[in-house]
Amino acid sequence: MIGTLESELSGYAFSPLRDGDFPLYRGSSDSLAPVLLVTAEETSVAGLKRLEHEFTLRAELDVAWAARPVALSRYRGRLTLVLEDPGGEPLDRRLGRPLDISEFLRIAIPLTGALRRVHEQGLIHKDIKPANVLVNVASGGAWLTGFGIAVHLPRERQIAEAPEGIAGTLAYMAPEQTGRMNRSIDARSDLYSLGITFYEMLTGTLPFSAADPLEWVHCHVARQPTPPGERAPIPGQMSAIVMKLLAKTAEERYQTAAGVEADLRKCLAAWESGARIDPFPLATQDALDRLLIPERLYGREREIEALLASFERVVVNGSTELVLVSGYSGIGKTSVVHELHKVLVPRRGWFASGKFDQYQRDIPYATLAQAFKSVVRSLLGRSDPELRRWREALREAVGPNGQLLVNLIPELELVIGPQRPVPDLPAQDAQNRFRRVFERFLGVFARREHPLALFLDDLQWLDVATLDLLEYLVTRAEVRHLLLVGAYRDNEAGPAHPLTRALEAIRKTDTRVHQIVLAPLGLEDVGRLVADALHCELGRAQPLAQLLREKTGGNPFFTIQFLSALAEEGLLAFDPGTRAWQWDMDRIRAHSYSDNVVDLMAEKLQRLSAPTQEALKQLACLGNVAPIDMLTLVRGEAEATTHAALREAVHAGLIFRMDSTYKFLHDRIQQAAYTLIPEEHRAEVHLVLGRALLAGMTAEQLAVHLFDVANQFNRGNVLVINRAEKTQVATIDLRAGRKAKASAAYASASAYLSAGMALLDKEDWDSQYELTFSLWLERAECAFL
């Protein structure tokens, strides 16, 4: 429908079914089909987007198991989603007391069946709760509503943001959905929420209670619920089913809604025949028919223990420690570090992380900015009184020099407000000022009541300015309650690398430095990974594990990608008859596979559609992480078209869509995507991207993304021939150089200024004297500094 719904709905009488952020109304009429209406507050941008998103799913939802959207328009001044009314009443209206066993089963079975149908459509609901369920006990029907945050993905990553900002309902949320479990969200996350719902149906209460959002997160991540059988007189087998659904890790839960449904039907048959349910083996019909590699870490127990011990010392002693995690690419450094999330929750600690980019090494402090952007954004989701406290603390910390940090983290201005320009100082004084201001800023987050873990990935690609600042911070006695974790490829950081020299200097101070070296996985660890992925006995998995170990050298990332490639090419397949995974070792051995993970990933990328490959090439040029608006800008198309182009890569698990950005799963995938561009055409691609960014940005946007634009032009500057464009690019390089110099990042500044100088020649001393002289003068100053 287009326009408003006033005339279409004029013949209905409406009654409320649900309160809250998304009120639900039932519309009845003597002559018209019944409907449901969902509305959202006009001031809630996220709420309006949810209604719009749910409407886009209308073709995938079936009235047999969901309230299907039929229209989205305005009604009585509010955006309104119209749904077909399947009947029934909201499940939460029946709760508040324990349901008897028969009533529970007659609701739980069709509800689980509805969720099974959702998952068969490739959807993850992400907000399963009684308020989003309609039930009709008499007819045995159950229908799901509330698809506003559902995703059409096999897996999705949730960033660790403020609990208040996480989409979903905290009381029913799976541990991984909080972003604090180092795990992806998938269909099994819905099964956890189903378990919470079952618990409430059987006992009349939730398994946990909490006073604030962070406590809810802690409950789901760390606290074990009291078994429902200890709270209400229910059969032990049903209590066991609920507790299996509520396992903290997805691998220990039911794997499919079909498996849950089968066990519930056994319970109903037993109950109806004798009013008792004897124990039986759970999950015997719970086979997963698609390959889902476990995300648990294998063979890393000691390393994780050492990392967590460092964090505990930081908390207890109020100290600063530097932990270095080293090993080859794909060895699992990032995964090990992200295990910190679990221990940060009970301590109410902060986790800030950034990743250096192999193709953008001259942007000063970019990784620190990336790390603290998410922290600052999370403040904006806090309550007004809490935000006010953070605002006052940050203003006091930065004093009159707040603009230095706003230049680095533009989002900070939304918290502390507009800042005065900072006065110019001699170079050494300016560097000292920046260091002190950043130290005080960091100290706002690193405190006894909420320690800070700062993780910087791929240190082998760090810029000199960031390296100098980190060395300053970890050797300062005034910096407390800080765990600085750096991961790097030790095979790419030799004795002459600036990182190696800086670490030698740090070790000579009183700073506590702990080194964690990750080795390849042994055969036993690879065997456990394969056995868990294929849900088979270790002995059966051993020959395949041996082959994988030989082929990949025990590199976890390569092992996982190799196993996935076998499934994609049909050499590893699920047999519905035996309900088990089958493979032919002779066929696998006969198949030619590259020993190089980048080549393997490139082959995988080449099987994607041409539009997806093109989008991935552009994403790789922009960086390991890129905002959707920048990607849309360089592609010159609508945002929805860009999402469509990347959907195939998201489904393949090569990239993640997180909030308003896209991120490569691993820098080896970014590298493989970049190699899809023939070397002789790369300069041309970068130049096209630079021109698109410059043409599409306002002056304010250019100021924020100055380094990004300069980098694209500089990687394509051999093709800049037009004198006017050379002048334009040289001017951008001058601005970038000055911006880097203002942050005391003299090496990065020199790189931009040198690039600008290379675009000009002797004639420009006459035609562009001011520009040419400024580039040479600034370059000379940076060389001196």
Image: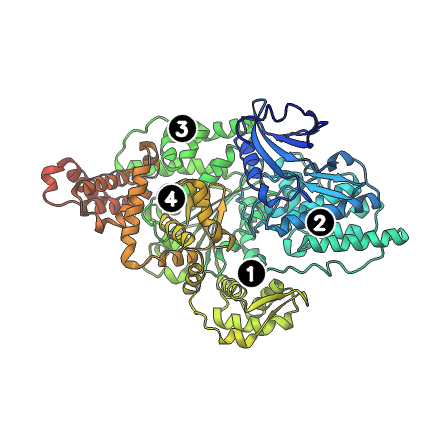
Mark 1: few, some, or many residues within 10 Å (few <14, many ≥20)? some
User: Where residue 545 sits in the image (x, y, percent)?
Assistant: 56, 70
* Mark 4 → mark 1, Cα distance in angstroms: 30 Å
* Mark 4 → mark 2, Cα distance in angstroms: 48 Å
Relative placement, left or right, of 690 versus 67 is left
Q: Nearer the viewer, residue 243 or 388?
A: 243
The amino acid type, in three-letter code, at marker 3 is Gly
* Mark 2 → mark 1, Cα distance in angstroms: 38 Å
User: Where residue 681 sits in the image (x, y, percent)?
Assistant: 28, 56
The amino acid type, in three-letter code, at marker 1 is Arg
Q: Which of marks 4 and 3 is in front?
A: 4
Q: Compared with residue 174, is residue 301 higher up or lower down, i.e. above or below?
A: below
* Disc 4 target residue: 366
* Disc 1 target residue: 300
* Disc 2 target residue: 113
Q: Nearer the viewer, mark 3 or mark 1?
A: 1
For marks 3 and 1 on the same chain, the one whose residue lies earlier in the sequence: 1
Q: Which residue lies furthest to the front in this view?
A: 31
Q: Which of marks 2 and 3 is in front?
A: 2
The amino acid type, in three-letter code, at marker 4 is Ala
For marks 2 and 3 on the same chain, the one whose residue lies earlier in the sequence: 2
- The answer to the question of whether label 4 and label 1 lie on touching residues, with beta carbons closer than 8 A, is no
* Disc 3 target residue: 399
Q: Is mark 2 on a helix, strand or loop?
A: helix
- The answer to the question of whether label 3 and label 1 lie on touching residues, with beta carbons closer than 8 A, is no
